[in-house]
Image (cartoon, rainbow, N blue to C red):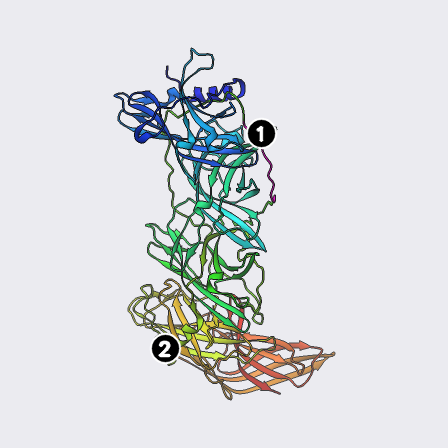
Amino acid sequence: MKIKLQTLQSLRRWMKAAIPVTALGFQLAVPTAQAGQPGVFINDSTYFTVQDVSLSGGTGEAYLQFGLKLQNGSGTAVNMNDYGVKVSDASGHSFTAQLTGKQTAQVESGQAATFRFSSQVPAKDTLGQLQVVVFRWDMTRPDLMDELGALPVADAGTSSAVRQTVVQADEADASLPSDAAVSFQAVRTFIVHQDEQAYLYTDLLATNTGSTGFALPTALKYRFVGTQSDSYSATVVAGTDTALLPGETRKVTVKAPVPSGQPRAAAGYSLQFYSETASGVSVLGSLDVAGVTTESVIGEAEPVFGRSGVRQLAATTTNATISQQSDGTHVSAIVAVDNKGTDIAALPALSAAFQFGTAGAAVSAADTSSHPLYLAPGESSAYRFDAVLPSGLKAEDVRLALFAATASGKPASTSSSGSSGSSSSSGATSGSASSSSSSTASSSASASQADNGTAQAGASGSASSSGSASQSSGSASQSSGSAGGAAPIAVTVLTGATDGSDAFASAKAYNLGDKLPLASSTISSDLDVSLVEFHANPDESDGFRSAFAKFVVTNHGKNSVSLPSLTTGLVTDSGASYPGSRQTSASQQLMPGASYTLSYSYLLPAGVNTDRMALTVADSRSAVSEATVAVSPQPADDGNVLHVYPYTVTMNNEMLQWSYSGGTFTYKLTLDLKLERQTQVIVDGNTPSLEFDLVDGLGRTLASQTLPFTGTNQLTGGLQTVDIGSFKDVSDPLSLRVYETFPTPDGTAKRLLRTVNNP
């Protein structure tokens, strides 16, 4: 008699609740299949064997998963709907064995098929105490089961890492249809430190194996379980914001706080899926996560799983430098994100943190260069991350954790349960039996186009005022390195990082205006990139000083081409590295025969020797195109001639006029200027401006006026009057400071050009 799957599912649930069954015990002699493996035979040439067994511990219950292989050597097809499976132990109890996949039930002559099952058993049971019982459905028997034999699971080939399971979502939410099931596959696990706390992250690929779309129920809960039955509640970071369509695969990320000092391989952890009922906890599935713990090395590519689970992008820490300085350990890393797929992929917004020690210490790092929203197949984008860590760290002590914004963009809440150890009932429900297979083929998981998290909107990095130490810090803060709504996509140990002084020693001699040797396939051969200005401000009162570099890009071709996005840094003679912060906005295209300027600022500690430095320049779309040249600051402008490439500004005269009325001083500045410009260089709203600051005798900046070289209120040749402002409290003597300014992601960069006393 052939019974349909739906009937068997209903029968299984009824039997689980109502029918007591006696276990076989272990005195049964089990015939052997091929290679001496125990088998349960239907006939001389058709038999069942057990393989890939995993027993994951829990609190009060354990989770047994196994594969039941049917080898059909007969001349006719065998339908698995005619057979059932249960698990029994040495105590005489039987437990439900649930099918964890959806596949064709019929096994043709001469073929073999493996059906995955799972069963909840008492935590005290070992593999040596458990066996898989195979029976044929028989409606003439009181218990409906004709037992064919039992297979000891201890004799089967055990699998230490079951990384895929199917969870019946309707077991967590009864309002869902009976075929609402999700296949979960563990693809990678990270342990990272955030806010002085260690977190365990796991990426799952969730596939709807049912016939209707549904959202993962909120009643479906997650927890990490350790080898000592310690349990840590996990929350979903991303992937459950919308319904999962039939056959659709989506990346789901969960995380949980775990004790600091955990092994980075997350040894012994499993991820359990469960629901809470009136009678306790019902475990619906379990996955090993330790086996997919990911920690890469320099030069090793890590796949970036998109929202739909497609791996088009890969992230690689291509190189890193580390050096010991008076203010700590300076570390710098270049990360390349490559599109290795065949379709356009969205580039996620990335951040990073350098992690060290076992107490949860991390220092955040932000890349300030601009990046495209999308990458075409074969394209790449490079990121530079810099930080100052505590003194004495070695390369092998440091890890770079790379984070990507989650699809929802919402901060991930953390539900910490500590070592909860809450358990469900023992699971010794007697008389449980289940149908073994579906009679229909499952729909395969369709891989939709990858969208790799949240696409960024231009350059990353948080803005701060220009006078603060935003690019480097002398002390190790405990910041997380990821903004709210971000999850790790790669962790790289920096073993093999080069000494920072090597970059300084290898710098090539360079003359301002020469073409930089950028050998990159992503930069058009029609483009020349040259450094035309390099300056350094004196030490500021807040303990820092600034350096500035200006590049000019020239198109010698006959067609418009894209401007390169350059990533730059300065390296001192001692090996300390400081990243460049590029002007916030720039043109995207450069017409034939034209040139365009790109300005960068560098924040340096006071006292740094800038007489000779190494300048590193790379195209952010190709991490291997770096050029390193030796540079020295140009002499400061002397007198009334200011060099602000592409302009030369001559201040023929400047006069500060004031009036007094009602206790208020009102100031106006009259300028007599001569402007000269390199005609082939494009000037637009992104070109640096001149800023005029009025400073009183106490060093206070009373007012500032910024005049651009183009647009509204632009600088003009000849006489020009500028309203400075009105003030009640003014201390003589007054001075006028003239700056070149441009906005960056780290704030406004200001290069001092001239100070006029008593104007």
Question: Amino acid under label 2?
Answer: Lys
Q: Quadrant of the N terminus?
A: top left
Viewer-proximal residue among 128 and 296: 128
> Does residue 340 lie above or below 575 as drawn?
above
Side of 52 relative to 429 (left or right):
left
Residue 419 is one of the magenta-drawn residues: yes
- Residue 344: x %, y % from top left: 36, 51
Residue wearing tag 1: 425
Q: Around disc 1, counting alpha carbons within 10 Å, would you say few (fewer than 14), some (14 to 19), or many (20 or more)?
A: some
Q: What secondary structure do most residues of the magenta stretch adopt?
A: loop
Identify the residue at horizontal 45%, vertical 48% (top origin): 293
- Residue most extreme to the top: 140
Disc 1 or 2, which lies upstream in sequence? 1
How many neighbours does mark 2 have within 10 angstroms: few (below 14), some (14-19), or many (20 or more)? some
Query: Dividing the image into 4 quarters, which one contains the C terminus?
Result: bottom right
Residues rendered magenta in the picture: 417-427
Q: CA distance from mark 1 to mark 2?
A: 71 Å
The residue sitting at 54% across, 68% down in the picture is: 391
Q: Identify the image quadrant of residue 382.
A: bottom left
User: Compared to 759, does 283 lie above or below?
Assistant: above
Image position, residue 724 (x, y; %):
61, 77
Which of the pair 361/559 is nearer the observer? 361
Q: Is residue 551 visible?
A: yes
Front residue of 435/733: it is: 435
Where does residue 555 sit, x and y in percent of width and height? 33, 71
Q: Label 2, on which residue? A: 508
Secondary structure under the numbered disc 1 in the rendered image: loop
